[in-house]
Image (cartoon, rainbow, N blue to C red):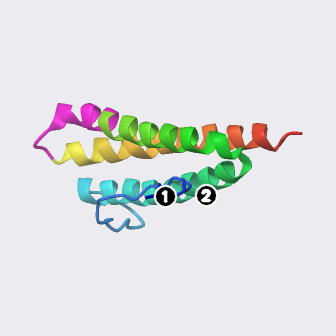
Amino acid sequence: MAAAPVQPPVIHETFTPLPCPMHPGTTIEIEGCYEQDILKTDRQINAAAKAIFFKLRADARAGFVQSEKAWLVYRRAGCAAEASKYAGGTLSGVVDAACTANRNKTHVRDLSDLLKTLSTP
């Protein structure tokens, strides 16, 4: 039986996003705004990762997919550790979501830089 071909990596969040009101004031509302940021940057990461994937030579694609999966494990574990200081409290979700949104923004920049490098003749 042949192995399935390698596909571009895609982030799928497990949370059900909360709404983000115009003027968030509660921890739930603030968390919802961070979740909306996460989903927006996930889409940017997915688009950049797809573009990078198709610019890579076929023999480099599996390694790229593996590195993206490892980054996602790092993001989730690192942000969970950061939020653990507030375990059991309402601030835990806010800290986790803020951390995730910030790491996503950094990763978008990193992927953009990689895409530029791969696009340069």
Q: Residues within 10 Å of mark 1 (few under 14, many from 20)?
A: few
Rendered view: 4 above or below 62: below
| Residue 79 pos. (x, y %) | 32, 37
Q: Which mark is residue 47?
A: 2
- Between 49 and 86, the residue placed more toward the observer is 49
* Image spot of residue 114 (x, y percent): 69, 38
Marks 1 and 2, the one that precedes in the sequence: 1
Against 32, residue 108 (above or below) is above
Question: Would you say the magenta stretch is mainly helix, strand or loop?
Answer: helix
Residue sitting at x 38%, y 67%: 21
Q: Quadrant of the C terminus?
A: top right
Instruction: Write down the quadrant of residue 84 in the picture.
Output: top left
Residue 23: image tag: none
Alpha-carbon span between mark 1 and mark 2: 22 Å
Which class describes the residues within 10 Å of circle 2: few (<14), some (14-19), or many (20+)?
Answer: some
Magenta stretch encompasses residue 25: no
Q: Residue at x 28, y 47 (%)?
A: 94
The residue that mark 1 highlights is 4
Q: Which residues are magenta?
A: 78-89
Please, what secondary structure does the residue beneath circle 1 have? loop
Q: Which secondary structure, mark 2? A: helix
Q: Which residue is nearer to you in this view: 89 or 55? A: 55
| Amino acid type of the residue tagged 2 in the rendering | Ala
Task: Give percent across and percent down for residue 70.
Answer: 43, 37
Task: Please check the rendered image and state whether residue 86 is part of the magenta-colored stretch, yes or no.
Answer: yes
Rendered-image quadrant of the N terminus: bottom left
| Residue drawn where x is 21% and y is 44% of the image | 91
Count all numbered tags in the image, as a single digit. Answer: 2
